[in-house]
Image (cartoon, helix red, strand yellow):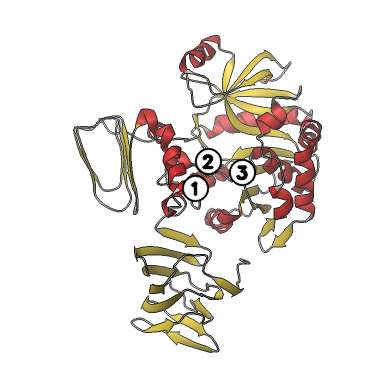
Amino acid sequence: MLTPVILSGGVGSRLWPLSREYYPKQLLALVGNNTLLQDTVLRLSGLPEQSAPLMVCNEAHRFLVAEQLRRIEVSPANIILEPVGRNTAPAAAVAALAAVNPDALLLVLPADHMIADTAAFREAVTAGIPLAQANYLVTFGIVPNRPETGYGYINATDAIEDTVALSVERFVEKPDLETAQQYIDSGNYYWNSGMFLFKASQYLKELETFNPDIVGTCRIAMENALEDKDFLRLDPASFKACPSDSIDYAVMEKTNAAVVIPLDAGWNDIGSWSSLWAVSDQDDEGNVVIGDVLTHNVHKSYLRAEHRLLTAIGVEELAIVETADAVLVAHKDQVQDVKEIVSRLKAMKRNEADLHRKVYRPWGYYESLDIETRYQVKHITVNPGASLSLQLHYHRSEHWVIVKGTARITRDDETFVLTENQSTYISIGVKHRLENPGRLPLEIIEVQSGSYLGEDDIVRYEDVYGRE
């Protein structure tokens, strides 16, 4: 039986400021109405007999991943939580260890790719099934249509008898433009898609041969994993000790069992603003325009406004992206360097690297409206039936004003209900909880004041979502 394994641990920093560490690109609807993760799961429909998908994601994204699956009415076999990112080889290893049947065929797919021709994708996967059953490690090589310097390549030559697959000669790193053109001209090179199909047991056997430390630490992480409602939490200490490596480096470049199936299906890893521009609908001037945007004499540009009017005059080949707290302007030839800006933001300890103004939580979300040295104003929305943890703060007090819905509030030993236009005050050091007992979203304005306003000034006593 086919077991889809969806890897959703990436950050997508090259698509900043839209993609951020705590809300990365696979969770965004960049092309169409569904998110990339949702499209990845939905395109599995029509494949041969398969089990429910097995998700591997960053612990910080667990509720977002679960909610996005719920919205497309998909129940995963499990959602495995990585305490830290360790690349694709360990992620696939824990998925193989979690498989109910050791000989299950794992279809390992990144959650952040776009594939236009789903029929061609399903045809390629179906062609790979007998090869994986015969203990080959199958990867899918994208038929290149240009000399791309942003992808790794697979050199493949001899055909595997009675199949559409080719034997892998070697994997090569991202080339310069001249070398990439030589690869295209030879006809023997394919883009490395990062998609794989193999038996769980065969992958672990090969990984044990070439990188036993990865298998060993992943086994311990799984043996000491904890079931947490809808999630499986890998043991943090052992998984953090696991070497970080990709499936390519750890296994595929070393094994004699690697084969590649050419895939021509309109694939794109949407790794930059220029690649997103290339796969999006363009107007007569070659522009991709999303949101409240006005242009004059603008050509071949990507313009996206999330919160306010964006205007551009007399420019071309630019990516201009506006969010609530940041604006990016970059030439399309240099969008690969967006990650350098993100690195500098992290070095400066600026929240814009990791968080949006609107921050999602399992109970709803909050949005920062204003923040200064000793106060902050937030708009908080609590979903029907949801509740925040029972908590206290050592450095700030909070004033809550109910603007929509009904709130049940716990404050030390008292519990009371407030409705629209009513308010209450939570002083420093007081245990408190906010709940929405109603059927409509609860919205409040929270005014924080104090010497420190960071999100780490929270001491939790009870939490229905299993957070520490």
In terms of depth relative to the viewer, which is nearer, 68 or 92? 92
Mark 3 / mark 2, whichever is N-terminal: 3
Label 1 sits on residue = 24
Secondary structure beneath dot 3 equals strand
Q: Position of residue 435 (x, y in %)?
A: 50, 77
> In the image, which disc is placed on residue 35?
none
The quadrant in which residue 297 appears is: top left
Q: Secondary structure at mark 2?
A: loop
Q: What amino acid is found at the position of numbered circle 1 in the picture?
A: Pro
* Left or right of residue 313, residue 189 in this image: right
- Quadrant containing the N terminus is top right
Rendering quarter of residue 302? top left
Q: Looking at the picture, how far across and down is residue 345, in whole percent?
A: 43, 47
How far across and how far down the image is residue 107, in percent? 67, 38
Q: Quadrant of residue 14?
A: top left
> Which residue is nearer to you in this view: 315 or 243?
243
Query: Residue shown at 54%/21% (left/top)?
Result: 143
- Cα distance, mark 2 to mark 1? 9 Å
Q: Which residue carries the number 2 mark?
A: 112
Q: Which residue is mark 3?
A: 7
Callout 1: 10 Å neighbours few (<14), some, many (20+)?
many
Q: CA distance from mark 3 to mark 2?
A: 9 Å
> Decide: marks 3, 2 in contact (CB < 8 A)?
no
Q: Is residue 98 visible?
A: yes
Q: Earlier in the sequence, mark 2 or mark 1?
A: 1
x and y, in percent, of residue 428 in the image: 47, 79
User: Horizontal placement of 464 versus 313: left or right?
Assistant: right
256 over 349 or under it: above or below: above
- Do residues under tags 2 and 1 come within 8 Å of each other at their CB atoms? yes
Determine the CA span between mark 3 and mark 1: 13 Å
